[in-house]
Image (cartoon, rainbow, N blue to C red):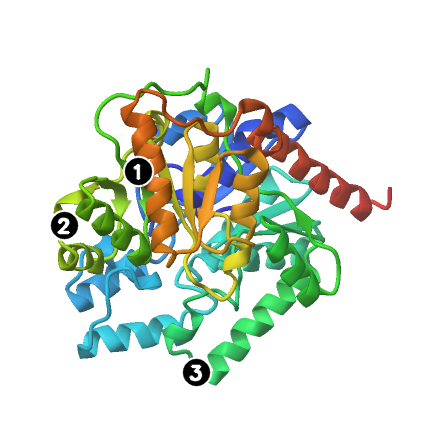
Amino acid sequence: MTYYFPPSGGAGVQRPLKWVRYFRETGIEPVVLTVRAGAYPALDASLQADVPVGTTVVRTRAPDPFGLYGRLTGRSRGEAVAARTGTVGQSRSLPERASRWARANLFVPDARVGWVPFAVRAAHRLYRETPVDAVLTTGPPHSAHLVGRALARRLGLPWIADLRDPWTDIHYTGALGRSAWAQRLDARLEASVLREASALITVTAPLQDAFAQKAGRPVALVRNGFDPADFPAVGPAPARGPFEVLYTGTLYDVPHGLLEALAWLRGEGVDVPLRIVGAAPEALVEAAARRGIADLVRFGPPVPHDEAVALMRAAALLLITVEAWSYAAGVVPGKTYEYLASGRPALGLGPADGDAAAVLRDTGGGTFRAPGDVDSIAAVLREHAAAWAAGTPRAGAPAEALAPYSRRVQTAAVARIVQDAVAAARGA
């Protein structure tokens, strides 16, 4: 059960989509319950090709609070979806403040919670027609887990909850302006999911520890990854064209240290463009202009996944950012694994002792630097730019180091968790 499923694009769709693609190899026949037209951060119809022929996909209605939010505040629907994490700035207008208050206090645990009653009803109808052995929910949105909880309670089905992000500890919770009662409700919902699910899964070691401490029981670790089928015949890309740093996806914060490094290098006669294919905060343009490098920061719209992969494989240097959130050490952006699979090197900006840094270090796929260490960032950029110009671009992670991050391998791990939960429910 997932809110994000094709034609949804973005990072959240990849994990459930690849499970569906490979579950049959493990003996599991997936049945997908999702939304008919969700509030997606992006659309990518090309991902439909990854859904195996004959897979049952049931789509339900889902209220769209972001559409209403956009109409009230004068934003486009896409800006309204992005506003949930503060990527489009803050307005002091009355409609904006009222909408944010409603988002924080009337939609708990998240703005997609209106989907829950539709999903529960559809799941009951589906179960009468095609009984299933277990329920697997993945979030965010964590409201998806409330559907799993309802089915587990009413039908007695084993239920596995996959938590890809923190819940009550998510970085923007404090900025939402939630009332005390809304915070208590959110905490109760999280606790009930952690307590009642037959098994729990998460994506990084620090999140595994955090959820295990809250739940008072073990939590399985199944990382995000990449699909080898998306990266055939990976090899070092030859140096061609000008050197540039590539970022794909949504950039949530302005990387001030990186901009400072680009400005310093320009002063030394070395121009390093930063290309962002996706979305970025409005403040990034102003921050670059203030440093005299507005022409070095280039933007492109989101592209289908296969096009993004092609861009990664031809890149000189790929950029990973881990924002300064309270749980930053436990963040490994989903793009990290696809960056590694591209065979191109990555520069990460974030905590050097974090999980993302460990992944790059263990695979030899790149290096992490502190976001404010301008000298060190500039040194890495200069080294890669010189190697690119000389026709000897630095390589990324070797293919043999990436086996644990294969979506096929990870789907098998999830399948074992599901099968164990079913066996336990049957008393086997």
Residue for point 52% across, 40% down: 360
Q: Which mark is residue 273?
A: none
| Location of residue 208 by image quarter | bottom right
Instruction: Residue 310: give x, y in percent of width and height.
Output: 33, 25
Q: Between 205 and 110, which is closer to the camera in this rendering?
A: 205
Q: Amino acid at mark 2?
A: Ala
Which of marks 3 and 1 precedes in the sequence?
3
Q: Which mark is residue 294?
A: 2
- The quadrant of the picture occupied by the C terminus is top right
In three-dimensional space, the C-alpha distance between marks 2 and 1, rounded to whole angstroms, equals 16 Å
| Location of residue 318 by image quarter | top left
In the rendered image, the vertical position of residue 79 relative to residue 35, given as above or below: below
The answer to the question of whether label 1 and label 3 lie on touching residues, with beta carbons closer than 8 A, is no
In the rendered image, the vertical position of residue 149 relative to residue 36, given as above or below: below
Residue designated by label 3 = 179
Q: Residues within 10 Å of mark 2 (few under 14, many from 20)?
A: some
Q: Amino acid at mark 1?
A: Leu
Q: Which mark is residue 246?
A: 1
Give the farthest residue toward the top: 233
- For numbered disc 3, what is the local secondary structure? loop
Q: Residues within 10 Å of mark 1 (few under 14, many from 20)?
A: many
Instruction: Residue 364: give x, y in percent of width and height.
Output: 53, 34
Q: Between 75 and 279, which is closer to the camera in this rendering?
A: 279
- For numbered disc 1, what is the local secondary structure? strand
Instruction: Residue 13: give x, y in percent of width and height.
Output: 44, 41
